[in-house]
Amino acid sequence: MSDQEKTAEKSELEMTLRQRVEAALEKVRPSLQRDGGDIELLDIVDGVARVRLQGACAGCPMSQMTLAWGVEQALRKEVPEIVRVETDRPLPSFGGLPFGRPAAG
C-alpha cells in the first residue's frame, strides 16, 4: 500500500460518522439536483439518518422510492453503521402504497 493510500485510509477512519454520511450524500446529490431536488442531513441517532428532501423531491410521488432505493442504499453501502434513513415529514405515496418497507400493522 502506498503512502497516499495509507493517508487516505487513515483520514477516512478519522472522519466522524456525520462527515461520512455527508460525503455519501454528496455522491447521490447530483442525481437529485438534476431533477430539481436536494437533500439535507438533519441528524443521526442510533444508526438512523434523518434527512429532509427539498425542492422537487419534497412533493414528488416517487420520493419514497428515491429515499429507499437511492439514498438509503447508497448510505448503507458507504456507511455500514447506518441502518435506516427517515425523513422529517411524511412523503407522498405512489398509488396509495408506500415503497421500500411493508406497511406497519
Image (cartoon, rainbow, N blue to C red):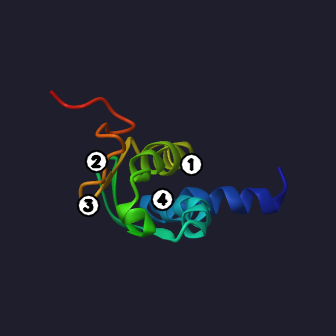
Position of residue 13 in the picture relative to residue 93 (left or right): right
- Identify residue for label 2: 46
Label 4 to label 1: alpha-carbon separation:
8 Å
**Mark 2 burial class by Cα count in 10 Å: few <14, some 14-19, many 20+:** few
Q: At 26% from the left edge and 61% from the top edge, which residue is drawn?
A: 88
Which of marks 2 and 1 precedes in the sequence? 2
What whole-number distance in Å separates the C-alpha atoms at marks 2 and 4? 14 Å
Crowding at dot 4, Cα within 10 Å, few <14 / some 14-19 / many 20+, comes out as: many
Q: How far apart are marks 3 and 4 (CA)?
A: 17 Å
Taking the image as drawn, is residue 52 in sight?
A: no
Residue type, mark 3 in image? Asp
Q: Mark 3 points at which residue?
A: 88
Q: Secondary structure beneath disc 2?
A: loop
Residue 47 or 50: which is nearer the viewer?
50
Q: What's the residue type where badge 4 is placed?
A: Val
Whole-percent x and y of residue 5? Answer: 77, 57
Foreground label between 2 and 3: 3
Total marks placed: 4
Question: Mark 1 vs mark 3: which is more N-terminal?
Answer: 1
Which is more N-terminal, label 1 or label 4?
Answer: 4
Circle 2: residue type: Asp
The residue tagged 4 is: 21
Using a 10 Å C-alpha cutoff, classify the residue at mark 1 as few (fewer than 14 neighbours), some (14 to 19) or many (20 or more).
some
As drawn, 41 above or below 90: below
Side of 9 relative to 78 (left or right): right
